[in-house]
Amino acid sequence: MEKSRVLVVGGTGYLGRRMVKASLAQGHETCVLMRPEIGLDIDKLQMLLSFKAQGARLLEASLDNHRGLVAAVKQVDVVVSAMSGVHFRSHNLLLQLKLVEAIKEAGNVKFGATGHCVSTP
């Protein structure tokens, strides 16, 4: 199986942490977006450091910094968004749209016919 370079956004959440572990277990080069907004959330920081110890790369970028987000996306083939949908009607919907715009501008991750992102061959 061909290995991909995967970026997981929301990697410290309930689904995201499982996606990171699964990607690493499959041998993919795995990156986790580390948002500066994480602040001093010790549990999330420890989880990110644990991912790093397991071989993941931490890419620091804010979803509010378009240039930084595009730069992070350009380093991978696949983007997995596991951001919480708990507040779907508010801020997180806008963050998802910012991520989609960064993916479009980066140009290296293609969207499938269903609208889902797929990696380039």
Image (cartoon, rainbow, N blue to C red):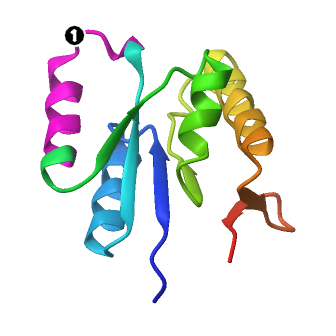
Seen from the viewer's position, the closer of residues 102 and 14 is 102
Q: Identify the image quadrant of the N terminus.
A: bottom left
Residue drawn at the location 22% of the way across and 16% of the way down: 41
Measuring from the top left, give residue 118's x and y in whole percent: 69, 66
Q: Position of residue 116 (x, y in %)?
A: 74, 59
Q: Is residue 88 above or below residue 90?
A: below
Horizontal arrangement in the rendering, residue 83 relative to residue 100 (left or right): left
Task: Judge the density around disc 1: few (<14), some (14-19), many (≥20) Cα neighbours within 10 Å.
Answer: few
- Give how far across and how far down residue 25 sits, in percent: 26, 71
Q: As drawn, which residue projects farthest toward the right?
A: 113
Q: Is residue 71 left or right of 100 when viewed as pictured?
A: left
Query: From what the image shows, is residue 71 above or below residue 116?
Result: above
Amino acid at circle 1 = Leu
Q: Is residue 11 left or right of residue 21?
A: right
Residue shown at the point (68%, 78%) measured from the top left? 121
Q: Does 109 lie within the magenta span?
A: no
Q: How many marks?
A: 1
Residue closer to the observer: 76 or 17: 76
* Foreground of the two, 16 or 105: 105
Taking 27 as reference, is 83 above or below it? above
Q: Which residue is mark 1?
A: 40
Kindly identify the residue that appears in the image at 69 percent across and 70 percent down: 120
User: What kind of element bears circle 1?
Assistant: loop
Residue 36 lies in quadrant: top left
Residue 31 lies, in percent from the top left, at: 39, 49
Residue under the point 33% across and 75% down: 26
**42 falls in the magenta region:** yes
Q: Which residue, as the protein is rendered here, is positioned at the far bottom?
A: 1
Q: Is residue 29 left or right of residue 70?
A: left
Q: Which residues are magenta?
A: 37-51
The kind of secondary structure the magenta stretch mainly shows is: helix
